[in-house]
């Protein structure tokens, strides 16, 4: 088996394939499918996935050759379910932010079904045309980010799994904080989260997608008024 094109071309093409496969099948391709698709031997295919992980495009299940995350897609069940209302496809997102970011990436009408992190009350959010159309049980669900931006990538599995969640209201977030002392943390509205997602997710399914640079990320945070220490990277 041979490697087509340059190493950069291979990484680009495999990344695109992973995202396209996730979108179409609502699950991740396995390494063997990548080997067959690109005519690669196992070491080359695995190294390509590891390179994509190092570049922060995907995350592997620790200690394995399997894809766990390709943000916003999750290969395992989570409390963050996204339903594309026209195609009736259902996806699991990695976190509350990713659940909202699906709408920015796919540009399709969607429903989010999740839970309040405080009381496990069911939360439903309807997004259409880059806008929150409705939400239940309240009109002000929040996306809560408990870790500051500089720490997100220290352990991205921990960050996504435990530190980016929904609360059904500001009152429920305040009640949760009383019994779970935290330092810092930021609560965003759904509208703010949609805007926050744009440079990170809007073009993810395009072949030439590139993650925003540090300077671009800082500028985007500032454009949204996110200038406090929590957002320093």
Image (cartoon, grey):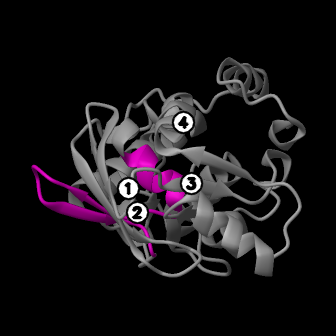
Between label 4 and label 1, give the one nearer the viewer: 4
Whether the residues at callouts 3 and 1 have beta carbons within 8 Å, the answer is no
In front: 214, or 231? 231
Using the numbered discs, state the Cα–Cα distance from disc 3 to disc 1 in whole angstroms: 42 Å
Using the numbered discs, state the Cα–Cα distance from disc 4 to disc 2 in whole angstroms: 40 Å
What SS does tag 2 mark?
helix
Q: Residues within 10 Å of mark 3 (few under 14, many from 20)?
A: many
Quadrant hosting residue 196: top right
Identify the residue at image location x=78%, y=46%.
149
Which residue is labeled 4 in the image? 192
Q: Earlier in the sequence, mark 4 or mark 2?
A: 2
Whether the residues at callouts 4 and 3 have beta carbons within 8 Å, the answer is yes
The dot on residue 35 is 2
Identify the residue at image location x=28%, y=53%.
23
Identify the residue at image location x=71%, y=27%.
221
Q: Residues within 10 Å of mark 2 (few under 14, many from 20)?
A: some
**Is residue 198 magenta-colored?**
no
**Is residue 85 magenta-colored?**
yes
Q: Earlier in the sequence, mark 4 or mark 1?
A: 1
Whether the residues at callouts 2 and 1 have beta carbons within 8 Å, the answer is yes
In front: 4, or 19? 19
129 lies above or below 174:
above
Tell me residue 213's x, y (percent).
Answer: 72, 26
Q: Which residues are magenta?
A: 79-102
Identify the residue at image location x=52%, y=63%.
69
- 184 lies left or right of 144: right
Q: Looking at the rendering, in which quadrant would you find the N terminus?
A: bottom left
Q: Earlier in the sequence, mark 3 or mark 1?
A: 1
Whether the residues at callouts 4 and 2 have beta carbons within 8 Å, the answer is no
Quadrant hosting residue 47: bottom right
């Amino acid at each position: 088996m041979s490697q087509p094109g340059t190493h950069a071309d291979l990484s680009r093409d495999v990344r695109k394939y992973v995202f396209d496969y996730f979108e179409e099948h609502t699950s991740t391709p396995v390494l063997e499918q990548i080997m067959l698709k690109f005519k690669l031997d196992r070491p080359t295919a695995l190294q390509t996935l590891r390179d994509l992980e190092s570049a922060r495009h995907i995350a592997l299940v620790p200690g394995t050759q399997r894809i766990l995350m390709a943000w916003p897609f999750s290969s395992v069940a989570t409390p963050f379910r996204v339903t594309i209302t026209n195609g009736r496809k259902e996806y699991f997102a990695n976190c509350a932010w990713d659940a909202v970011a699906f709408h920015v990436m796919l540009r399709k009408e969607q429903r989010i079904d999740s839970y309040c992190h405080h009381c496990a009350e069911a939360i439903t959010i309807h997004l259409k045309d880059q806008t929150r159309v409705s939400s239940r049980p309240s009109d002000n669900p929040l996306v809560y980010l408990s870790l500051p931006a500089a720490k997100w990538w220290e352990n991205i599995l921990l960050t996504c799994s435990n530190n980016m969640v929904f609360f059904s209201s500001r009152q429920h977030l305040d009640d949760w904080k009383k019994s779970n002392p935290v330092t810092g943390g930021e609560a965003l509205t759904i509208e703010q989260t949609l805007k926050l997602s744009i440079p990170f997710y809007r073009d993810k399914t395009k072949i030439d997608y590139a993650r925003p640079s540090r300077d671009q990320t800082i500028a985007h945070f500032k454009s949204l008024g996110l200038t406090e220490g929590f957002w320093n990277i």
